Image: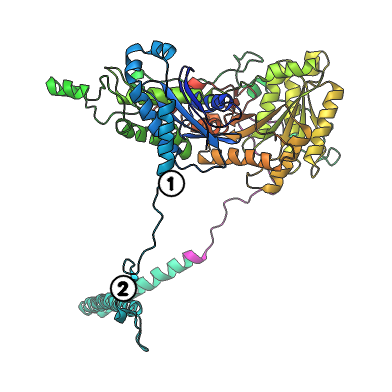
Amino acid sequence: MLDFFTIFSKGGLVLWCFQGVRGPAATAPVNALIRSVLLQERGGNNSFTHEALTLKYKLDNQFELVFVVGFQKILTLTYVDKLIDDVHKEFRDKYRNEFQQKGALGLLNGTFDFKDDFMRLLRDAEESSKVRAPTVMKTFEQSLKSQKTVKCMIETRGEKPKEKVKNKKNKGSKKDGTEAVAAPSKASAGEKQLSAAGEKEELTKDEILQKNREEFFRRHMKAGEKSRSPKPDAQKEKGKKPRVWDLGNSNAKVLDYSNSATNGSAEACPVEEFDPDMALGDKNREPGRLRELEYESDDEAEEEKVVQNPSKPSVKKGGLGGMFGMLKGLVGSKSLTREDMDPVLEKMKDHLIAKNVAAEIAVQLCESVAKKLEGKVMGTFTTVTSTVKQALQEALVQILQPQRRVDVLRDVMDAQRHHRPYVVTFCGVNGVGKSTNLAKISFWLIENGFSVLIAACDTFRAGAVEQLRTHTRRLNALHPPESHGGRTMVQLYEKGYGKDAAGIAMEAISYARNQGFDVVLVDTAGRMQDNAPLMTALAKLIAVNAPDLVLFVGEALVGNEAVDQLVKFNKALADHSMAQTPRLIDGIVLTKFDTIDDKVGAAISMTYITSKPIVFVGTGQTYCDLRSLNAKAVVAALMKA
């Protein structure tokens, strides 16, 4: 039984509504559909789930209408698709003239009495689902067994199956083949021996003796060369020499940890001397400013070659044939059909997959664009290719622009007013750059005047604590306490290896509250999305400490794996959390963006699958290589041929 059926315009005006059962109104689920699907360009699937309801919808792009039906998701209603198609056809045929003549005024001032028609269509749809004939079993005459004779099913004793006989025949043929190959080879060897004997007969005895001696000495010299081992030109000096990098520190004493008294402790190690310009990279930077991604697009003529219409010939042919051929791809006041868009959408899908967009996401994006444009009336001088491309660009920009903007600086200042630290937790798979980008974000926060406490909760990976200790030393060298009124801007809170990560994070947050730190950055161990024990530990850390922001760190090099990682991380956090409303990923840090050129599809895949914003983008190895996402720049790189 249906809960509701509503028809409204894309401008938000409800034209007609049917309430099937007594209960909550259709406002909340329809609003959720508009926010999560229609506005976010996620119309690849015509079904949407909201709490206990399943919503199915259909778009009418010619008259800008939306048809939505809602029913309980525990029900299996087979007639819903037929019903929504019949209602769509009946409604637009009944009020077609009113829409065409009056336009928007017809929607505002019109009265739509559609209840009787809808009830008739509903009864017809329900009856059609019941009238389906039950499946009838096949008779013996219709089966394949009835076509076999009795003789072919009888096996006599001693008779071997036909397949084995065939195999033996094949083996015999193989043997014959090998013998046939061997015979000519033997013949050729015999011919060689005869020819050699003939040559020897022509030579004199002295010449033959001299020739045999030369062959003997030649073979002996070759054997002697093989047995000799080449002597090294010079013996290698004993001991190891440190490698000296071109841009590295040439001071060997800094790298010498052989003194047992220091034991690698931060206090006993000498302060590392390095060039600040090399650590920062960008000399023309503005301190504390997070710049946007930049992308230099080519000429518009080159960008138009992203997807070419196969029916569009070159203009160089000249004459009337070239003119009419050029106009062949134009659509003149005609409604777009699926057949018109399919060739262009297929090329668009292949182009997106080549740009590292996950295959599943590329298919859904093209399906969404097709549903958005199907039935839409185009202008006179508009090609199908340019229309589809423009719609896809708008959809991609809409996907990359988040529903909720994450403003870290504003949230930190709000936490300051409540006299508590702002807590950020970093999670992700192994080797994506969590610790490195945590240090970049620390530097950005310090330049904005906030003190940072780094919690070393990666107690598993060897060298994880030492890596954060080195970053802390460097950040304190770039921003010494003397420049901030004697206040240490960044500290490391660590308890070594093999400890409980959730307990270390809780102690670090308590320490930051007592010492007056503004931000706590929690570094966690890398883990694969399929490792259930490690995912349980991460869910425990997040549930116990309740961070203000949970950031998933993912690299821009992945394609289909990005979807699998994010889906399973969110699912694991939801499954292993004991809270009624589990805490999931709040945002994304996209790393290694400088290694992919224009293959930026991972950004689309990650934002599409989670509906979460990309908060930071890592673009290099220095502390200044941190950017904010520019949706238009990413889409321009994605659509480049």
Specify the segment rendered in magenta: 225-251
Mark 2 sits on what residue?
A: 211
Frontmost residue, 402 versus 410:
402
Amino acid residing under circle 2: Lys
Separation of marks 2 and 1 at Cα, in angstroms: 101 Å
Q: Is residue 285 magenta?
A: no
State whether residue 448 is above or below residue 146.
above
Mark 1 sits on what residue?
A: 130
Q: Whole-percent x and y of residue 77?
A: 49, 41
Please give left or right for residue 466 compared with residue 89 in the image.
right
State whether residue 155 is above or below residue 478.
below
**Tag of residue 254:** none
Majority secondary structure in the magenta region: loop
Amino acid residing under circle 1: Lys
Frontmost residue, 10 versus 137:
137
Q: Whole-percent x and y of residue 5?
A: 49, 29
Please give left or right for residue 206 compared with residue 616 in the image.
left
- Extreme bottom residue here? 158
The residue at 58%/21% (across/down) is 628
Q: Looking at the image, can residue 293 be seen?
A: yes
Image depth: mark 2 or mark 1 in front:
1
The residue at 15%/21% (across/down) is 318
Name which quarter of the figure residue 146 lies in.
bottom left
Q: Residues within 10 Å of mark 1 (few under 14, many from 20)?
A: few
Q: Is residue 239 magenta?
A: yes
Q: Whole-percent x and y of residue 595?
A: 52, 32
First in sequence: mark 2 vs mark 1: 1
